[in-house]
Structure formats: structure tokens, C-alpha cells
């Protein structure tokens, strides 16, 4: 049933009896599935913020039910003690310490903690760009389940540079890789993406390449090359065939949405040129779990080929 979160304003008035019934008998997930429908209806203007909050919470619950425990990869560097703020799990690197020692050959110089070099484990970051079709064909259940898939990614990569792009008549950046957002904030923002217009897949790929360049210049030591996950049905109604662009990607995973076979060839070509694979999502309800599988492979350092 419809469960309101904390601070939810229950004292609202809707004059349409049918709409009142819709809310009264709806579960939180039902609200999420119909959020775009409610958002476009003027009767819900006064309570749409609350409905968005309920929808986002429902999406998060779905995502949290999917994810499990995955060990994130690490790498080891020799660094001065002053750089390693966390001094747990380290070993003294004697060779580096002697090489950089200001006191070496100077017996009058006292050894200080800051003179020591250690081998320290750091968590390896996984830059990722997710490019999503949000045209008219992606409303309702498709949009809600896509939001769950995005939430799964951010729950597993809370501190990594994750960029999110949505495309319809044009591509728009929903989240910059360096932007810090809670998963809840990201889901709310994504749910408010207007699902409209044509499907400009080419522009979505172009925006992805721009973010890839940005991530490359901003990536820190130990970061893996950025991967791109493209969610599409493989059809486009604006722009050109985008396959020519994907050869410039290091690792492009294409999640082909729907059972239409006419667009499989394009999806396979894009994934092949992007040095990875296409995965079919015939049953949309499986999208969050398939996305979780992609996330686990990336976390384990497995490039999907």
C-alpha cells in the first residue's frame, strides 16, 4: 500500500475521484511506475514532490534487494607515511625509505616518522559512464526499472567517478563524473528527466565520448580505464548510425532492451567496435539484475569481451 515517508504532506486535495482512488490503492512501486503519468497531470501539481520522494524510495528498496557483498579490487603503492592518512594494513618499504632518506650518510640527522616510506593498499577506482535512452519508448515501467539499475550502480560505486547521460531528441548529462550525489538524489533527478521527442542515439554516444575525455584527464593514480554501459533498444529516429563513434571507446557494454530482432545487428556492431559485448535484456524486469552482473564483473576487474 501507499506508505508516505517522513514529512510527507497528507493534507492535500484532489478533486478527481479517480485519481484519489489511484493513490489510495497504489503501492509505493505502483507510484514509481506511474510517476511520469502523475507528473504530467495538473491534478497532482501540489503533491508531485511527495510522489517523487515516494517513487525514489521505492526504487532504492528495489535496488538494495538486489545488491550483495562484492570485494573491490586494490592496488599497492610505495608512499611516504605523510601521504597515507590511514596507516592500517601497511608494510615498511625499506628500499624506498633509504633512497629518499635525508638522514642517509648523515648520522647527526634524527630519523622522523615522515621520513618513512611504506607499501600501502589503496582501493582501485572504476570510472564508468552510463548512457540511457529516455525517449518516449522508455516511460512507465521501463523508466522505473532503469532507475533501479542506476541505483544499483551508485550503491556499488559510491565514491567512484560515475557519469550518467540521458538521450532523447538530444543528449543531456544527468550526473557529471566528479559530482557527488546521494543515490536518493540521483534517482529523484533521473525520475524527472522528460521522456519525450525522438531517439538521438548518435548524440548520446558523442556525449559519452566527451565524458570519457574528461574522466581520462581527471582520473587519479590506480584508476582503471573508463567503461561505458549503453542502455538502448538499438533504434534511433534522429541523427546517423552511431556505430562509427564506438571504435573510440576502450570498453563499451551494450544492454539491448526489448525483444525486437531488427536492431540486434547494430547493438552487436557497437559493442564489437567498443571492444566488449552486447547483452540482451528481453525481459525488462531483469534489467537491474543484469546491470548488477555487469557491475560485479567490473569490480572484479573482468573486462566483458
Image (cartoon, rainbow, N blue to C red):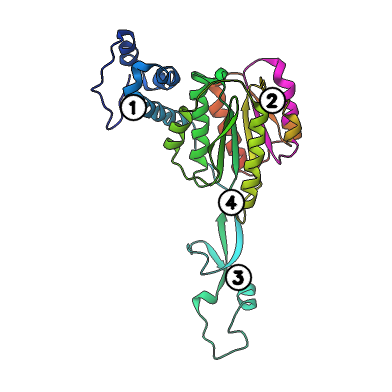
| Real-space Cα separation, disc 3 to disc 2, in angstroms | 56 Å
Query: Most extreme residue toward the bottom, as rendered?
Result: 108
Residue annotated with mark 2: 239
Q: Which residue appears at 60% of the width and 55% of the height?
A: 220
Image: magenta residue range: 247-270
Dividing the picture into quarters, in which one does residue 21 lie?
Answer: top left
Q: Secondary structure at mark 4?
A: loop
Identify the mark nearer the N-term, 3 or 2. Answer: 3
Q: Residue at x 51, y 19 (%)?
A: 139
Q: Which residue is mark 3?
A: 93
Of discs 4 and 2, which sits in the foreground? 2
Circle on res. 124 = 4
Residue in the foreground of this view, choosing between 85 and 197 = 197
Q: Are marks 3 and 1 in contact (CB under 8 Å)?
A: no
Residue 163 placement, left or right of 181: right
Q: Residue at x 68, y 40 (%)?
A: 303
Indicate which disc residue 50 carries: 1
- Residue closest to the far left: 11
Tell me which numbered mark, 4 or 1, is placed earlier along the sequence.
Answer: 1
In what quadrant of the picture does the C terminus appear? top right
Amino acid at each position: 500500500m501507499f506508505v508516505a515517508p517522513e514529512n510527507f504532506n497528507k493534507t492535500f486535495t484532489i478533486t478527481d475521484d479517480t485519481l484519489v482512488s489511484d493513490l489510495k490503492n497504489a503501492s509505493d512501486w505502483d507510484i514509481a511506475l506511474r510517476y511520469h503519468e502523475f507528473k504530467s497531470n495538473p491534478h497532482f501539481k501540489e503533491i508531485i514532490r511527495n510522489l517523487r520522494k515516494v517513487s525514489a524510495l521505492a526504487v532504492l528498496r528495489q535496488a538494495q534487494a538486489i545488491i550483495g557483498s562484492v570485494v573491490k579490487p586494490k592496488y599497492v603503492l610505495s608512499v611516504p607515511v605523510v601521504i597515507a592518512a590511514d596507516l592500517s594494513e601497511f608494510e615498511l618499504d625499506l628500499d624506498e625509505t633509504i633512497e629518499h632518506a635525508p638522514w642517509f650518510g648523515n648520522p647527526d640527522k634524527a630519523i622522523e616518522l615522515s621520513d618513512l616510506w611504506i607499501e600501502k593498499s589503496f582501493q582501485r577506482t572504476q570510472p564508468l559512464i552510463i548512457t540511457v535512452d529516455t525517449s518516449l519508448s522508455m516511460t512507465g515501467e521501463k523508466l522505473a526499472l532503469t532507475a533501479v539499475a542506476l541505483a544499483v550502480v551508485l550503491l556499488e560505486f559510491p565514491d567512484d567517478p560515475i557519469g550518467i547521460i540521458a538521450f532523447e531528441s538530444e543528449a543531456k548529462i544527468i550526473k557529471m563524473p566528479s559530482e557527488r550525489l546521494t543515490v536518493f538524489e540521483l534517482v529523484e533527478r533521473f525520475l524527472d528527466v522528460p521522456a519525450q521527442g525522438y531517439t538521438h542515439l548518435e548524440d548520446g554516444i558523442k556525449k559519452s565520448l566527451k565524458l570519457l575525455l574528461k574522466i581520462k584527464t581527471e582520473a587519479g593514480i590506480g584508476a582503471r580505464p573508463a567503461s561505458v554501459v549503453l542502455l538502448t533498444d538499438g533504434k534511433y529516429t534522429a541523427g546517423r548510425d552511431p556505430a562509427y563513434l564506438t571504435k573510440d571507446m576502450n570498453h563499451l557494454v551494450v544492454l539491448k532492451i526489448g525483444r525486437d530482432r531488427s536492431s540486434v545487428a547494430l547493438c552487436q556492431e557497437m559493442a564489437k567496435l567498443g571492444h566488449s559485448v552486447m547483452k540482451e535484456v528481453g525481459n525488462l524486469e531483469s534489467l537491474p539484475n543484469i546491470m548488477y552482473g555487469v557491475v560485479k564483473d567490473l569490480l572484479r576487474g573482468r573486462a566483458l569481451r
